[in-house]
């Protein structure tokens, strides 16, 4: 076997290490930059779908509240109509479910 000159190995190592170290430093710097930019990238990617979901949720919420208001108005109208009919029929509402026409009262 041929003997390897330690000086030649050291020179070769320094020649190879320097570019590798520079590449490593560049990779570290680039990955640091990307790590710093990552929240912005994620935000920009996620922002539009989240805004769309928020808009849809708000629209649905407004529709539900509108329907509840409509239903409430209809119930109020129905109660008023029932009260009017009871008055016309001469029925008074007592403490329970017992209804006695006013003409049958003694």
Image: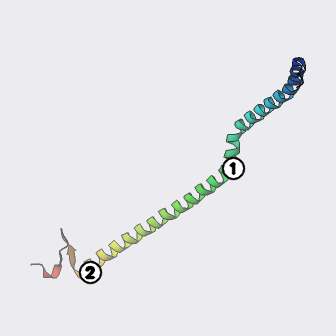
Q: State which quarter of the image contains the N terminus.
A: top right
Which dot marks residue 28?
none
Q: Position of residue 77 (x, y in %)?
A: 38, 72
Residue at horizontal 20%, vertical 72%? 97
Residue at horizontal 70%, vertical 41%? 38
In this rendering, is residue 61 above or below 27? below
Q: Dot 1 surroundings within 10 Å: few (below 14), some, or many (20 or more)?
A: few
Residue projecting furthest to the front: 1
Front residue of 54/43: it is: 43
Residue at horizontal 83%, vertical 29%? 20
Front residue of 3/83: it is: 3
Report the side of 34 relative to 53 (left or right): right
Please identify the quarter of the rendering in which residue 6 is found: top right
In this rendering, is residue 106 above or below 12? below
Circle 2 residue:
88
Circle 1 residue:
45
Q: How many marks?
A: 2
């Amino acid at each position: 076997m041929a003997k390897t000159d330690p000086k030649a190995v050291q020179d070769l190592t320094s020649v190879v290490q320097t570019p590798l170290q520079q590449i490593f430093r560049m990779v570290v710097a680039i990955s640091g930059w990307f790590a710093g930019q990552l929240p912005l990238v994620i935000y920009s990617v996620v922002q539009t779908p989240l805004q769309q979901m928020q808009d849809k949720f708000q629209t649905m919420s407004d529709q539900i509240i509108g329907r509840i208001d409509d239903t409430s108005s209809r119930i109020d109208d129905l109660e008023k109509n029932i009260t009017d009919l009871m008055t016309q029929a001469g029925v008074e509402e007592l403490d329970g479910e017992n209804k006695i026409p006013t003409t049958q009262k003694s």
